[in-house]
Amino acid sequence: MANPTSRHSRSRRDRRRANWKGAAPSLVRCPECGEFKIPHRVCTSCGTYNGRKVIEIVEKSEV
Ligand SMILES: [Zn+2]
């Protein structure tokens, strides 16, 4: 049966647990408006994806 042969050291365990925070979110330039956007997501400033308008951007109106 698959069993661990030896126990990992405290150092190795702690190194593994120190790694959970991950990387900062990546941003790309929107090809339509040049604004920063999240890759593989619709642009939040012009509403296009893959050169096509997907959603209508409505200006937020304050009360
Ligand atoms: Zn855009």
Image (spheres, rainbow, N blue to C red):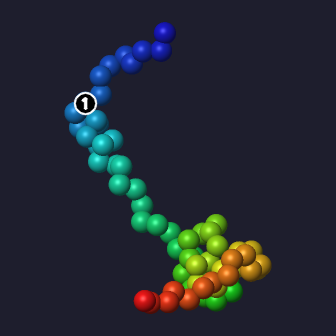
Question: Which residue is located at x 40 percent, y 56 percent?
Answer: 22
Q: Is mark 1 within 8 Å of ligand 1?
A: no
When asked about the image quadrant of residue 46, the answer is bottom right
Residue situated furthest top in the rendering: 1
Q: Nearer the viewer, residue 59 or 44?
A: 59
Q: Where does the image place residue 32, in percent across and percent down from the top left?
A: 69, 86
Q: Position of residue 48 (x, y in %)?
A: 70, 79
**Residue located at (46% from left, 66% from top):** 25
On the image, the x and y values in percent for residue 29 come to 59, 81
Count of marks overlaid on the render? 1
Residue 29 visible to an observer of this rendering:
no
Which of 55/48 is in front?
55
| Residue drawn at x 77%, y 79% as measured from the top left | 52
Residue ID at (62%, 78%): 43
Q: Is residue 47 visible?
A: yes
Element type at mark 1: loop
* Image x and y of residue 19, in percent: 34, 49
Question: As drawn, is 3 to the left or to the right of 12?
Answer: right
Q: Which residue is labeled 1 in the image?
A: 9
**Placement of 17 over or under 24, stated as above or below:** above
Q: Identify residue type, mark 1.
A: Ser
Q: Going by the image, does 18 lie left or right of 30?
A: left
Q: Residue furthest front?
A: 63
Q: Is residue 41 above or below residue 61?
A: above
Q: Quadrant of the C terminus?
A: bottom left
Q: Residues within 10 Å of mark 1 (few under 14, many from 20)?
A: few
